[in-house]
Amino acid sequence: MTNKVSVGEKIKIRQVEIKDVERIASLCEQLEYSVTNQQIELRLTKIKNNDTHIVYVATLEDEYVIGWAHAHICNSIVISTPAIILGLVVDEDYRHSGIGSFLMQQIEQWASLAGCDSVLLRSNIKRQEAHLFYEKIGYTNIKQSLTFHKKLL
């Protein structure tokens, strides 16, 4: 089921609140990230008052969260200061309605006001639909790379 909504009339964008934890966790599951409400609450609590992070949610008029976006300002030696998108998801029932674009515009505006000169994001190679979305809103694939991970005890 796809719910078509018009962005701006019925959708509100606001900063995340702790009350949004359950929906954020549910939306993470749609991207195959298994997280608990407690994990999301702990992570949000850590970053909520950190000015180098922003998390926006897209809600319906009744405050039901249908999308979220998280960005972080990254000071780097090798590149000038970008904002890095750490997560973006729109509920699968509300995709293709402009909500993702609306969230990205909010992130871009925040990044610009914070002195960033660009927005950078990484997207899993298997998320072809997401790649098309990013290209459609003006992003360019600048490189392919591998991601390595080491679990710390």
Image: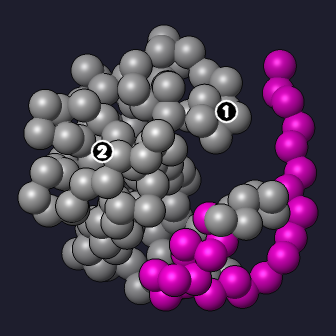
Q: Residue at x 10, y 58 (%)?
A: 9
- x%, y% of residue 44? 40, 30
Residue 103 is marked as: none
Residue at the image position 40 percent from the left and 19 percent from the top: 22
Looking at the rendered structure, the kind of residue marked 2 is Val
Does the stretch in magenta take in 146? Answer: yes
153 to 5, vertically: above or below: above
Q: Quadrant of residue 151?
A: top right
Farthest top residue in view: 38
Q: Amino acid at mark 1?
A: Tyr
Label 1 residue SS: loop
Q: CA distance from mark 2 to mark 1?
A: 18 Å
Relative vertical location of residue 118 with respect to residue 38 in this rendering, above or below: below
For mark 1, does the 10 Å Cα neighbourhood hold few (<14), some (14 to 19), or many (20 or more) residues?
Answer: few
Q: Which residue is mark 2?
A: 57
Task: Please state if 45 lies on the left or on the right of 86 as rendered.
Answer: left
Vertical position of residue 22 compared to residue 74: above or below: above
Q: Mark 1 — residue? A: 33
Percent position (x, y) of residue 13? 20, 52
Sooner in the amino-acid sequence: mark 2 or mark 1: 1
Disc 2 crowd, CA 10 A, few/some/many (<14, 14-19, 20+) = many
Q: Residue at x 67, y 32 (%)?
A: 33
Q: Does the magenta run of residues contain 121?
A: no
* Left or right of residue 23, residue 57 in this image: left
Dominant secondary-structure state across the stretch colored magenta: loop
Quadrant location of residue 36?
top right
